[in-house]
Amino acid sequence: MTRGKFITLEGGEGAGKSTQISLLAEALRASGLKVHTTREPGGSPGAEDIRKLLVIGDAGRWDALSEALLHFAARRDHVQKTILPKLEAGTWVLSDRFLDSTMAYQGYAQGLGRDAIATLAKLTLDDFLPDMTLILDLDVETGLARATARQDGEDRYERLGAAFHNSLRNAFRDIAQREPERCAAIDASGDINAVQTVLRAAVAARFGLSL
Ligand code: TMP
């Protein structure tokens, strides 16, 4: 059994990750692969419970370290219960957010620093990383306008203000630059189909597929 590949989509608010992930999953399935889509925080029953603590409520509800610990608790459960079993069964796993979100949000934008996040990642994930990470890059104004149009009440992070979201954008760009072999930065300013075309081409090139 060939192990599946683990691909993550990252980026700020309203970059279109969830739409792009379902289109990418369709393309991979059409090429004959088994695909599971998931998200963070969440993706396993325990992690979905933790998600509620993170995305609902006052913006200042947690300090940065408590918040990072909650994200890592959720992620460890997600990896153990969902991601690794699927990969080992030969299924490709596509996740809407993963470790780079904690690095960008809590490490950079909330100020914990890269070292603290790397230490927690080492402890909880044992060097497990995505095979490929697609970072959707979009200007903050457009992203927030798209994000506030959603009505699901999960807006704790979206209410953090433009300065926070600007540092987030720079954080994701920095992460993409530091790890070019794993990460591909994708311009998310075009329409859905244009972005999907670029994204598929990047995945196809990385894994030798025709999508
Ligand atoms: P979503 O809006 O993509 O569903 O993600 C929920 C929020 O959680 C989003 O505003 C980003 C935030 N988040 C972090 O701050 N750190 C993390 O590690 C993850 C996975 C998400």
Image (cartoon, rainbow, N blue to C red):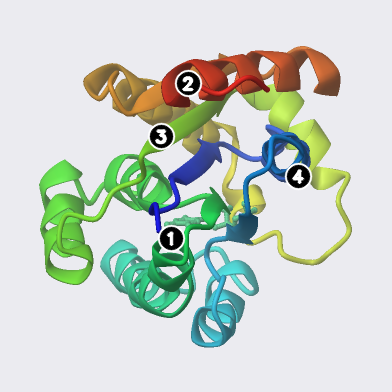
In space, the residues marked 1 and 3 are separated at their CA atoms by 14 Å
Q: Mark 3 near mark 2, Cβ–Cβ under 8 Å? A: no
Disc 4: which residue = 22
- Answer yes or no: disc 3 within 8 Å of ligand 1: no
In primary-sequence order, the first of circles 1 and 3 is 1
In space, the residues marked 3 and 2 are separated at their CA atoms by 13 Å
Location of residue 184 in the rendering, given as x and y in whole percent from the top left corner: 44, 20
In space, the residues marked 1 and 2 are separated at their CA atoms by 18 Å
In primary-sequence order, the first of circles 4 and 2 is 4
Q: Nearer the viewer, mark 4 or mark 2?
A: 2
Residue 170 in sight here = no
Residue 204 vs residue 111: left or right? right
In primary-sequence order, the first of circles 1 and 2 is 1
Disc 3: which residue = 132
Disc 1: which residue = 87
Q: Image point 37% across, 41% down: which residue?
A: 104
